[in-house]
Amino acid sequence: MDANDATRIAELEADNLRLRRLLDARGAPEELRHRLRSTVGMLRAIIRRSAESRAGDIESYIAHIEDRMDAIARAQSQADSRGWIDLHDLIAEELFRYGAGEGERAVLDGPCVRLRPRAGQILALAFHELAVNAIEHGVLGHAEGRVRVDWSLQDGGQRLGLLWQEQGARVQAEPVRSGFGTEVLTRMLRYELKAETDLAFERDGLRCSITMPMSDAVGTVHVP
């Protein structure tokens, strides 16, 4: 990493530090300060882990970190306007961004789940990593490829199960990119949401199963 690269990374860290100081200023509602502080902490982790996984490739590093921040920002926008994040909309928006429109290259099916802001941000990041991996290594890198995402309540509504399945294209089975993407799908989901994740590489592509307690910290099911 040369001096210019180090300077750009230092500027990102400095911006993040200034935002943290702003959040600590008096006058902001405590709930808002808590939510924003939580988001800033997540962004800080993204900056550091992205830098570690993309060392020496500053342009790729900047592109990936911007995309990850955009995924969180889209989730936060829902939370700001509604007070909660719709799971269907979260997944649909992320897949649409990568050329997999619902009804065309994506099938989504599940009950109406309203996620808490923090849980929504974590899951937005997880589905972002799955979508990017499908572009780089999986079925979304092929014209005939598509993705199916199903979610349901399990154990009498005590747990939420999500299943990501890639279909329609023969791909070279490769793992989710080692580094931050793997960490999000395994360690971060487990730490933040007490989730269990299973990754399997089948003839069509990746199959990712995620299950977690349907607690108040995760969200609620809305019955129209």
Image (cartoon, grey):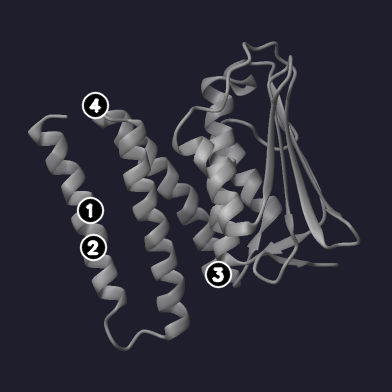
Q: Amino acid at mark 2?
A: Leu
Q: Earlier in the sequence, mark 3 or mark 1?
A: 1
Q: Which residue is mark 3?
A: 81
* Disc 4 to disc 2, C-alpha distance: 24 Å
**Residue 69 at what x, y percent from top left?**
41, 49
Q: Earlier in the sequence, mark 3 or mark 2?
A: 2
* Residue that protrudes farthest toward the right in the picture: 156
What residue is drawn where x is 78% and y is 59%? 112
Look at the numbered discs 2 and 1 and tell me whether their residues touch, using CB distance below 8 Å.
yes
Write down the quadrant of residue 220 in the picture. Answer: bottom right
Pick the front one: 139 or 44: 44
Is 2 rendered above or below residue 125?
Answer: above
Q: Secondary structure at mark 2?
A: helix
Q: Quadrant of the N terminus?
A: top left
Q: Earlier in the sequence, mark 4 or mark 2?
A: 2
Q: Which label lies toward us, 4 or 3?
A: 4
Q: Which residue is mark 1?
A: 13
What residue is drawn where x is 64% and y is 46%? 91
Residue 18 shows in this picture: yes
Is 57 rendered above or below residue 3?
Answer: above
Graded by Cα atoms within 10 Å as few (under 14), some (14 to 19) or many (20 or more), the crowding at tag 2 reads: some
Q: Secondary structure at mark 4?
A: loop
* 218 on left or right of 161: left
**Residue 5 at what x, y percent from top left?**
16, 35
